[in-house]
Amino acid sequence: MAVDRAIVRRAVGDAVPLYVPAIPFSLVIGLAISEAGVNPLAGWSTSWLIFGGAAQLTLITLVGAGTALAAAVMAALVVNARHLMYSAALAPTFQNQPAWFRWLGPYVLIDQVFALAMLEEKTDPVAFRTYYLSIGFTFWALWQSTTALGLALGPVVPDSWNLEFAVPILFLGLIVIGLDKSSKAAAALVGAGVTFLTAGLPNRSGLLVGALAGILAGTMIERFRP
Amino acid sequence: MSFVIAAVVVGIGTYLSRAIFILALANRRIPDSVLVMLQFVAPAVLAALVVAVLIDESGSAAIGIPELAAFAAGGATAYKTRNHIATLVVGMTVFWVVRALV
């Protein structure tokens, strides 16, 4: 089967500009691996094992902060639960696709791929497949490269710059940019407040208590708002 | 459990969360009540993470004036520009400048 090069070119052209905002994120992951004191190769392997920035950063920074591995794993998995929505939304489009693609496609189903793929769901199956894999693996290749770059930069950056502070700043940016209604702001505030109040719990499990409280608060407000 | 095993577990869990409806439950819909909850996962967890990484092992907050100033500036920048790069640059710059001053 010949690959339609025009579709590949268009896909790469769509993917690269969307990747630009992810570049600092990937560099921070590389730096966080150095800061956390995990083996660099093991830390970088999260880029292809997980291929999800927020979950990678969660796992790496929590482990670096001395969190029990099980709690860090739980937190990273909760962070990535939003992908369930993407999976459900794209499932109909994947139904007339071959099995190999239904197995491979989800591996690269990151936020940007979801956003672009939803715009293409009406195209014919072969064109969709070409487009999806082209954007997916463009993002994948860029992500592997720039996280490796961040890892290489990590030891070069002086400790006195306190670049690890970029992690909470980045998370704060993700929260604020994602806020499109007041119930989400409430979820964030309750999540932060309860995590602070439960900071004394063993293994930093307060993080999960806080996250759960935030999710419940947002849900309650959404449900009972007049 | 070593870090690599933890990464593999998160990797498998992440793959499953992306694949489950595409592979297995194509004809099922996520109940509306679950969809309502899922939209709050990101803000709640990320906010909890911000606090968690700022708390040291003893449970007290490792945060001072430079950090607070950086959060205020970074948050305002994110709100105004919706841009991750600008947020990071402004937040870190304010952090360094205020730290040098106080």
Image: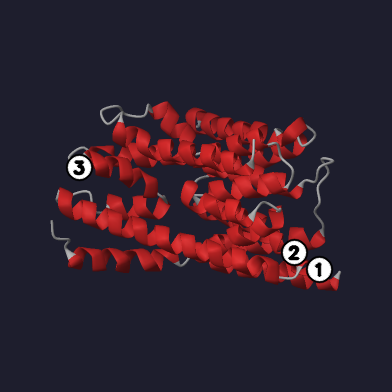
Is disc 1 placed on a helix, strand or loop? helix
* Residue bearing the label numbered 3: A97
Depth check, mark 1 against mark 2: the one in front is 2
Q: Is residue B91 above or below residue B47?
A: below
Q: Is the Cβ of the residue at disc 1 closer than 8 Å to that at disc 2? A: yes
Give left or right: position of A136 versus B9: left
Q: Nearer the viewer, mark 2 or mark 3?
A: 3
Residue picked out by circle 1: B99
**Amino acid at circle 3:** Gln
Q: Chain of mark 3?
A: A
User: Residue, x 22% and y 51% (percent of image)?
Assistant: A129
Task: Name which residue lies at 30% across and 36% down.
Answer: B22
Report whether A71 appears left or right of A86: right
Quarter where residue A184 is shown? top right
Name the disc covering residue A32, or none.
none
**Amino acid at dot 2:** Asn
Disc 2 vs disc 3: Cβ atoms closer than 8 Å? no
**Mark earlier in primary sequence (2, 3):** 3
The chain to which mark 1 is attached is B
Mark 2 sits on what residue?
A162
Residue beneath the point at 74% across and 49% down:
B54
Check disc 1 and give the amino acid type: Arg
Categorize mark 2 by other alpha carbons within 10 Å: few (<14), some (14-19), many (20+).
few
As helix, strand or loop, the secondary structure at mark 2 comes to loop
